[in-house]
Amino acid sequence: MTWAVFILIALISIILTRTRHAFLLPGFSRNTATVLFLIKVAAGFSLWYVYTVYYPDRSYADIWKFYDDSAVMHEALYESPGDYFSMLTGIGIDNRIEETYLMRMNHWHQPFESNLFNDSHTIIRFNALLRIFSFGNYHTHTLVMCLLSFIGLAAIYHWAYRIIPHWKRVILFTLFLLPSLVFWSSGVLKEGLMLFALGVFLEQFWKFLQDRKLSRVLWIVLTAALLAITKLYMLAFLAPAILLAMWLQFKPGFALMKFVVVIVALFGTGKLIEHFQPQFSPARILAMKHNDFVRLAHGGTYMYNDSVVVYLEAERRSLLVCTNGDSCTLEKNTPFSYWKIQDNFADTLKSNGNSSRVNYKVLTDIPKAGSIIDNRFLRPEFSSILLAVPKSVINVIFRPYPWEAKNALVFPALLENIFIFLLLLATVFFSKNIADVRVFWLCITLATINIAVIGLTTPVLGAIVRYRITALPFLILALLLIIDREKLLRKWPVLARFL
């Protein structure tokens, strides 16, 4: 039955790619859309294979940990349907539901939680809802996510094709064949939902500017809401980009000045939030996200007993001795850090491990990330954030460097970097007047803010390669808008078969 559902959805999806406007790609045959969709499905299976065979620990793989947590929510459908729908909607969750179901999940509550919405809940709920139809077949979840992300990417293609149809091959390659994008957007991850919402939002918003159809407002509102609960920061990036595009739509001219005004206004809004609501200060949130990521990247084991919480560095993990259950002790002379519960964790204390061996329970046990590129801690101040921006942008656009691409998951990103570098060179030697000022500055604003925030909050190269997939398409589209294709082909006619 589980594979019958998979086959049925797969057949419906293939038919849709050949018949429905949302899937068809202008300038290319119906077969192209079908083949690209099947490539996405193959990429989804590849992602499953990598995190099942090569990295088999499900507790650390995003494709598994939220899917596994959804099983806890799904079982409530049969035990207590009311509890299931409460968890699914977020309405009516009480202490009983928290203790019966949510506390049994490993990732409903994050190790480092902020005051903002926990977007992990969305992907858990998505999987819990889909389990009704998938009967627990993980590959059905992959298939549905591929379908949604394909719709979003096709919507971005439609939007870009109307403006620069002569770049259709490069647009198609960017959205459907860029290695990192096709890989990370094809699994059961938040990125698939985010690309679906972002693509449909942009296409419907741009059409609304032209025809003012109220039916488009519903799609705009729904996709904005989905962005808010999937990746709230993406909605925050999109807002100034949309405002700038609307400003240029109704008041053309002085585009660069208006871009600067929008960025300054964004900075000023952050300062106002810091003044009136310090707990929601963007500088504080960015620094907290970065510093939490650094701690996670360093890994280590947190343990506790009745009096202290202990932290053991990842490098000393072999000195941890666990016996029955989750009861563990440390080898003699093992240094560690600890905090006293009675002092409300006020001070970080150090121990050389000379005291008698004590039993602890493991709270979290996280391996060290293999590609940490930034060990510094940011201060929750705008000055600290601004000073870190240039290096952060370079990290996202140009890394990995050739000598850093040692991992099979990172190497394709090196090829992407070369592609982007060549496009940047083309903008220098083969530039022209911008094809559409509104779209150009929308793409630049969205890509710039996104890239800066990714670089500021993500100190691990492997994570940067994944997270930047929502920024690279808009950076590339902005570059295409100012490259003179005809001038380029006159200089390099051999490129005509590729471009």
Image: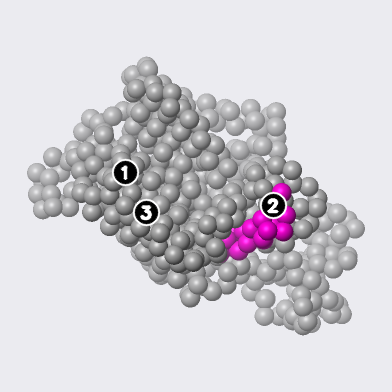
Which label's residue is closer to the chain start, 2 or 1?
1
Identify the amino acid type marked 1.
Arg
The residue that mark 2 highlights is 81
> What residue sits 88% from the left and 56% below the top?
343
The residue that mark 1 highlights is 20
Residue 324 picture location, percent across and down:
78, 81
82 vs 490, nearest the viewer: 82
Q: Residues within 10 Å of mark 1 (few under 14, many from 20)?
A: few
Q: Residues within 10 Å of mark 2 (few under 14, many from 20)?
A: few
Residue 448 picture location, percent across and down:
43, 40
Q: Mark 3 and mark 1: span between their CA atoms?
A: 11 Å
Check the image and report above or below for 361 versus 132.
below
> What residue sits 75% from the left and 80% below the top?
322
Residue extending furthest top? Answer: 251
Question: Is residue 101 found inside the magenta-colored segment of the image?
Answer: no
Relative to 161, 364 lies left or right: right
Residue 414: tell me if it is visible: no
Residue 434 picture location, percent across and down:
26, 31
Q: Mark 3 and mark 2: span between their CA atoms?
A: 30 Å
> What residue sits 70% from the left and 66% below the top?
364
Relative to 497, 334 lies left or right: right
Relative to 473, 385 lies left or right: right
Q: Which residues are magenta?
A: 64-82
Numbered tag placed on residue 12 in the rendering: 3
Residue 56 occupies quadrant:
bottom right
